[in-house]
Image (tube, rainbow, N blue to C red):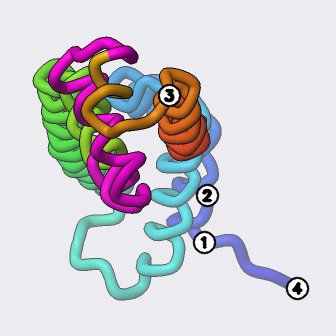
Amino acid sequence: MTLVTQEDSDFTNIFRTSKNGFIQFAYSYLGNMQDAEDVVMESYIQYWENKDKATFQTSNIKGYIFTIIRNRCIDILEERKYLLQKNDELYKHIIGEIELNISSLKGCDPSELFTSEIENIVNDTIKTLPNRTREIFYERYLEQKSYKTIAENFGISVKGVEFHVTKSLNVLRKKLKDYL
């Protein structure tokens, strides 16, 4: 047979009469009903597990449980504050990276990148052409000479000049296929 002490009876009475008020108190600070209920139930359990060690008067069980609830609410709010501060730091870091990327993209001129890249490809490709084809290409496109003048300079026919120009243009088209 189990003996029910006055203290057990007082606790049962406080549990029945104060539970909802405690939950509303915790909820008013935590803003989450599940958290509030958990805090109150954990506080009752903590009281029950430590009632024999407690240095309070049995007439103030309600005040003791209320203090546990208050302290647990403070702990939860401190945890939330800490997490929000960490999230804010992370958010500021991410915003900084995004702003840096935007700035970098705004400062980037794709036409300059492609122009220098294309120039390098053209120069490297022209260097690989046979000497006569390369010289005819230079006279035609850099010196803007006519086919007839180039033919006279090299002692070949206009068709021969056309052959060398077509040959160099075909090689350049192949090398620049990704840009055309």
Looking at the rendered structure, the kind of residue marked 3 is Ser
| Residue beneath the point at 53% across and 54% down | 10
Name the residue furthest right.
Answer: 1
Q: Where is residue 69 in the image (x, y as percent from the top left)?
A: 36, 48
- Range shown magenta: 123-148
Q: Is residue 6 left or right of residue 24?
A: right
CA–CA distance in space, label 4 to label 1: 13 Å
Residue 102 image-quadrant placement: top left
Query: Where is mark 4, residue-wise?
Result: 1
Q: Is residue 90 above or below residue 33?
A: below
Labelled disc at residue 9: 2
Mark yes or no: residue 165 visible: yes
Q: What element carries label 3?
A: loop
Q: What element carries label 4?
A: loop
Task: Specify the principal SS of the magenta part.
Answer: helix
Q: Earlier in the sequence, mark 3 or mark 2?
A: 2
CA–CA distance in space, label 2 to label 1: 6 Å
| Residue beneath the point at 28% across and 44% down | 135
Residue 36 vs residue 106, the one in the foreground: 106
CA–CA distance in space, label 3 to label 4: 125 Å
Query: Where is mark 1, residue-wise?
Result: 5
